[in-house]
Image (tube, rainbow, N blue to C red):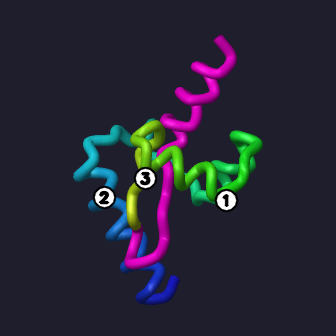
Amino acid sequence: MTDLDTLIRAVVREEIARAGLTAARARAETVAMAAERLSVDPKTVRRLIQRGELRGTRVGSRSLRVASSDIDRLLDEANR
């Protein structure tokens, strides 16, 4: 593991702790992964984050992650 990998993991752990997520809910996905799960374009995922329907967490200056639990919740709401 490189120093950069170690730094990224530390930043992700800090963001997870700051957001108050438990270890079970801490799994995060990229915008592209979230878009694939939701069957939408990545731009739509970014719009959902802007509207507050999904919670996005910045990792570094450019990378954005979405909590898997938020994606699961959105899918559950859509299937009701």
Give yes or no for residue 67 being in the magenta stretch: yes
Give the answer, above or below, for where 12 lies relative to 4. Answer: above
18 horizontally vs 79: left or right: left
Check disc 2 and give the amino acid type. Answer: Glu
Front: mark 2 or 1: 1
19 horizontally vs 51: left or right: left
Q: Distance from label 1 to label 3 (Cα)?
A: 13 Å
Task: State if disc 2 and disc 3 touch (CB < 8 Å).
Answer: no
43 horizontally vs 1: left or right: right
Dot 2 or dot 1: first in sequence order is 2
Check disc 1 and give the amino acid type. Answer: Ala
Marking on residue 15 = 2
Residue 40 in picture, x, y percent from top left: 73, 46
Q: Tell me the crowding category of disc 2: few under 14, some 14 to 19, or many 20 or more residues within 10 angstroms, Cα based.
A: some
Residue bearing mark 1: 32
Front: mark 3 or 2: 3
User: Residue 10 falls in which quadrant of the image?
Assistant: bottom left
Give the answer, above or below, for where 52 lies relative to 6. Answer: above
Q: How many numbered marks does the figure carry?
A: 3
Dot 3 or dot 2: first in sequence order is 2
Residue bearing mark 3: 56
Outermost bottom residue = 3
Residue 29 in picture, x, y percent from top left: 57, 54
